[in-house]
Image (cartoon, rainbow, N blue to C red):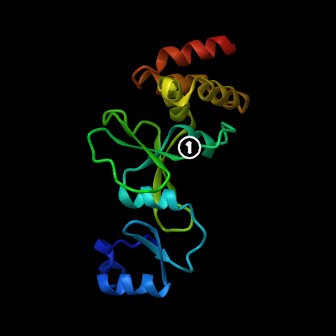
Amino acid sequence: MSAVKPGTAEQAGLSRSALYRAARQGRLERIARGIYLPADAPVADWDRIEAATRRPDATICLASALAHHDLTDAIPIALDVAIPRGTRTPAGRGAIAWHQFDRATFDIGREEIPNPGTDQTIGMYSPERSIADAFRLRGEVGYELSREALKEWLRRGGKPARLMEIASRLPRAKSPVLRALEALA
């Protein structure tokens, strides 16, 4: 089941008052401000559900995407989520770090994956896009994250040509990725 919001309660067969009554009675669980799941719903990542519910174009990026692809041992303290630049950043109390990426390059390396525990999907950047983003935003995410992810990706048989194709399409990514690949060769 998808998350239910007061604005979408009617689509789930509930009035707003029935939604709040179900939450008070324990049949629905409030996972974030204005977002509810059935109390018997399977275990799920509430931050991912909140991000996908608040922004249908939400895309997991940077350290969170690298961790999803098992390219880093770092455990992100917040879910890194990209949204197109110029759109409203959602308010919320969840552990979500919202990042605004250029609209022209937003869909490069983006795919939809299922959001476990719900019938929702959420965007996820490919390993190549995530590595290129880590290099271009290395001042923000740390220099070690990008190098560690690149080494692991290459060890698993990653294709440098595919990485360079994506890095060439992103601002400030091509040169640092190329230098790192040359240093590791």
Mark 1 belongs to which amino acid?
Ser
Q: Is residue 165 visible?
A: no
Identify the residue shown where x is 56% and y is 43%. 64
Q: Residues within 10 Å of mark 1 (few under 14, many from 20)?
A: many
For the question of whether residue 135 can be seen, the reply is yes
Question: Seen in the image, is 110 located left or right of residue 76?
Answer: left
Q: Which residue is pictured at 57% across the width and 65% down the height?
A: 44
Question: 137 left or right of 4?
Answer: right
Residue at (73% x, 29% y) in the render? 155
What residue do we see at 68% from left, 15% from top? 184
Q: Residue 3's x, y, as percent? A: 43, 70
Where does residue 167 sit, x and y in percent of width and height? 48, 24
Query: What percent of the width, then of the height, locates residue 181?
Result: 62, 16
- Residue picked out by circle 1: 64
How many numbered marks, from 0 up? 1
User: Closer to the camera, 6 or 184?
Assistant: 6
Nearest the eye: 84 or 22: 22
Q: Quadrant of residue 53?
A: bottom left
109 in relation to 148, above or below: below
Q: Is residue 97 left or right of residue 64?
A: left
Is 22 situated above or below 67? below
